[in-house]
Image (spheres, rainbow, N blue to C red):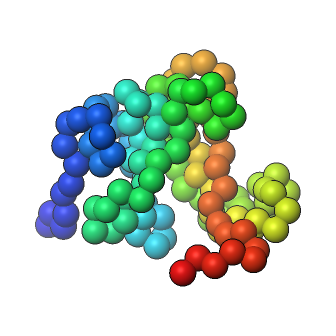
């Protein structure tokens, strides 16, 4: 049974040019990889765009024709040591790019101590 649809062709937040992969977090956030924009868009369960990450600006964390994504809660302990002091990783997102190094980026999602997230 189809539950929900959203998105359309385009080049603004919430639209897609070449969506390649998707992953769903435990809290219902949907992560969609778009290889044309070399980014990952994050959507709330109702389809609202929450933001994006990646891009081709050449900075650390950039992507190049990303094609795959995975969310892991089991790998947190492995990557916590790389997080900023005071930041607690709740889950990690791995994104594979098909062109240029780095081929795989690992992003930690969680909360920074002392910040109000309400």
Horizontal arrangement in the rendering, residue 60 relative to residue 40 (left or right): right
30 to 107, vertically: above or below? below
Relative horizontal placement of residue 45, taking residue 114 as reference (left or right): left
93 on left or right of 36:
right
Q: Residue at x 51, y 33 (%)?
A: 55
The answer to whether residue 30 of the structure is visible from this angle is no
Answer above or below: position of 31 versus 114.
above
- Quarter in which the C terminus is drawn: bottom right
Question: Which quadrant of the figure has residue 84?
Answer: bottom right
Q: Quadrant of residue 19?
A: top left
* Residue toward you, 52 or 45: 52
Residue at the image position 46 percent from the left and 38 percent from the top: 39
Q: Quadrant of residue 100?
A: top right
Question: In the rendering, at what x and y percent does residue 40 appear?
Answer: 46, 44
Q: Quadrant of the N terminus?
A: bottom left
Q: Position of residue 13 (x, y in %)?
A: 33, 46
Rendered position, 6 above or below 115? above
**Residue 24 coordinates in the image, percent (x, y):** 43, 60
Side of 26 where 13 appears, left or right: left
- Count up the numbered dots: 0
Q: Is residue 37 visible?
A: yes
Residue in the picture at 47% in, 26% down: 65
Residue at the left extreme of this rendering: 1
């Amino acid at each position: 049974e189809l539950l929900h649809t959203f998105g359309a062709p385009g080049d603004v937040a919430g639209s897609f040019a070449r969506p390649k992969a998707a992953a769903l977090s435990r809290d219902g956030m949907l992560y969609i990889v778009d290889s044309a924009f070399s980014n990952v868009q994050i959507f709330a369960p109702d389809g609202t765009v929450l933001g994006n990450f990646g891009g081709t600006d050449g900075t650390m964390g950039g992507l190049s024709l990303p094609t795959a994504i995975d969310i892991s809660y089991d790998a947190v302990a492995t990557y916590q040591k790389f997080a900023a002091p005071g930041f607690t990783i709740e889950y990690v997102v791995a994104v594979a790019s098909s062109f240029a190094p780095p081929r795989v980026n690992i992003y930690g999602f969680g909360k920074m101590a002392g910040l109000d997230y309400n």
